[in-house]
Amino acid sequence: MPETGRQTDVIHARKCQDFTLSGDLQHFKTAGDPAAEIDRCWDGSPAGALASVVYCLWSEKALYFGFSCPFTELSMDTGTPGEQPRWALWDLDIAEILISPMAQPVDHYYEFEVAPSGHWLDLEVVFCDGRPFYRWEQRFHEMVRSKIDLDRRIWTAELKIAVAGLSRPTAKPGDEWSLNLLRADGPAEARRYLALWPTLTPEPDFHVPSRFGRMRLVE
C-alpha cells in the first residue's frame, strides 16, 4: 500500500519516462499507485466526500503531479480562456503544490495552483521576518492540463514541473523534496481547505512551511 500523510511525513514519487500531459490521469494510473490521499482539512478534521487522490512521478528532468478531486458544485472562472495565468485563483476551486528542494527549515519555495477550468498560477515564495513574500511574474511549470467529468462529479489536473526550474540540475533516486499538497473547494460562504499535512492554524492558512512533509524519489 502507498504511504499516506496520516501514517508518515514522507510520500514516494515513482520514476517514469517523460510524457505529455492529457489531463485525465491515464498515464499516472498506468505508471504507479497513488502517492497519497488528501483526506483531511487544514485543521485536521476529516475531508469527507472531498477527499482527493494525488499521484507523484518523476524523471531526471521533471516532476509530475496528478490530482483527482471530487466535487459537489464547481467554483471556477468561466469568463476567460483556460490554460493561462489568473490572479487570485486561490479564491476558486484549486489543487495546489507548495514545494522546495530545501530540507527543513524551509524559507524559500514555489507554489503551483491549477483550477478545473485549466487556469493556473505560479508563485515564488520567500519568508522574511516570519512573513511570506510572493513573486508571480515568472512561469515555473512546464505544462498543465485539467478535465472535468460531470457524470462522475470529479475534476482532474496534471502538472509537469522542470527540475532545473526549481534549483536542481537533475533528479535522482533518493532525492527528497519538502512540500505540501493541498486543495481549496467551494464558494466563500462554504469554503473547504484540504491539506495532506494539516497546517493546524487558527484560520485556514496553507503557508506554514514548518508543517511541510517530504517527497522521496524512488525507482
Image: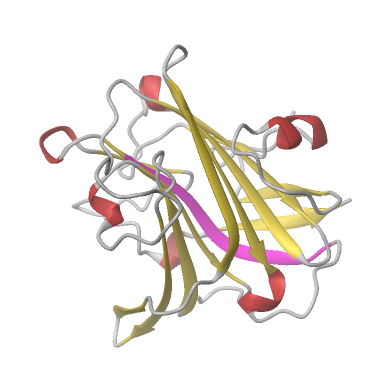
Find out whether residue 177 is within the magenta segment: yes
Is 11 or 62 nearer to us in this picture? Answer: 62
The image shows residue 90, relative to residue 167, as above or below, that is above
**Residue 74: percent from left, percent from top:** 29, 30
- Which residue is at a point 32% across and 41% down the rendered structure image? 93
Q: Position of residue 122 (x, y in %)?
A: 44, 66
On screen, residue 84 versus residue 142, left or right, reads left
Magenta stretch, residue numbers: 174-184
| Closer to the camera in the image, 139 or 47 | 139
Asked if 187 appears above or below 79 in the picture, the reply is above
| Colour mode of the rendering | secondary structure
**Front-most of residues 37 and 125:** 125
x and y, in percent, of residue 182 in the image = 43, 47
- Label count reads 0
Q: Is residue 144 magenta?
A: no
Write down the quadrant of residue 124 in the picture. Answer: bottom left
Horizontal side, residue 21 vs residue 193: left or right: right
Residue located at (40% from left, 47% from top):
198
Most extreme residue toward the top is 151
For the stretch drawn in magenta, the main secondary structure is strand
Q: Residue at x 84, y 49 (%)?
A: 16
Which image quadrant: the N terminus? top right
How far from the left and from the top, in percent, is residue 58? Answer: 76, 55
Q: Is residue 16 above or below residue 46?
A: below
Considering only vertical position in the picture, is 23 above or below 165?
A: above
